[in-house]
Image (cartoon, grey):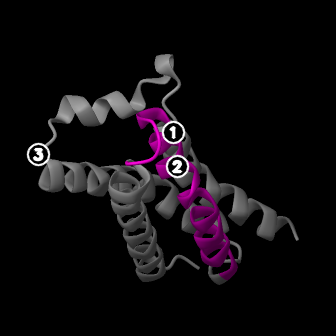
Amino acid sequence: MIRPGLAFLLWLAIAAMVIVNDVIGDTWIAMALSVRTVEWYKTLVPLPYVISMAIIHARRTTGPRWFEAALLPAMLWPFSTAFVDFLYGRLTFGTESAVFLDRFAIWWSAPYPLLIVTLAAAPLVAGWLLARR
């Protein structure tokens, strides 16, 4: 069963977690660590939370239309979370869009694409694993 309200509520929880994690990373953690380490911190800490939200979504949407239900958050969560993350940087620090796009620079081993890929893949993988059972 497709539940857009559930996907939206879980996305709100993910967005809140990412923003709070960014605030902690940009204030407390940034004073003690390098920029690259802070970027890894801001990417790796939300990953277990994103996976758990995907599992919650998969458990609530099991059934014959699990793929359509999993496709909704897989398409919406990555873009909307990246947009909220961009707005956080823009409103808090006044950063330009080019600075935000530098977070996707995989040639200097930027970890941010890992978070975006996990946001896209976790609902599909969790839905598939629960549908298989």
Look at the image and tell me in which quarter the N terminus lies.
bottom right
- Residue 102 in the image: x percent, y percent? 33, 28
- Evaluate if marks 2 and 1 touch, with contact meaning CB atoms under 8 Å apart: yes
Q: Are marks 2 and 3 in contact (CB under 8 Å)?
A: no
Q: Crowding near pointer 3: few (<14 within 10 Å), some, many (20+)?
A: few
Mark 1, residues whose alpha carbon is within 10 Å: few (<14), some, or many (≥20)? some
Magenta stretch: includes residue 102: no
Q: Earlier in the sequence, mark 3 or mark 1?
A: 1
> Which amino acid does the dot numbered 1 rest on?
Thr
Q: Quadrant of residue 99?
A: top left
Real-space Cα separation, disc 3 to disc 1, in angstroms: 22 Å
Q: Which residue is mark 3?
A: 94
Rendered residue at 39%/58% (across/down): 28
Distance from the alpha carbon under mark 2 to that under mark 3: 21 Å
Q: Nearer the viewer, residue 121 or 2?
A: 121
Q: Nearer the viewer, mark 3 or mark 1?
A: 1
Residue numbers of the magenta segment: 31-59
Q: Residue at x 38, y 74 (%)?
A: 12
Residue 37 bears which disc, if any? 1
Say which amino acid is labelled 2. Tyr
Q: Work out whether mark 2 precedes mark 3 in sequence or the reverse, and give the earlier one.
A: 2
Quarter placement of the C terminus: bottom right
The residue that label 2 is drawn on is 41
For label 3, the SS is loop
Amino acid type, callout 3:
Gly
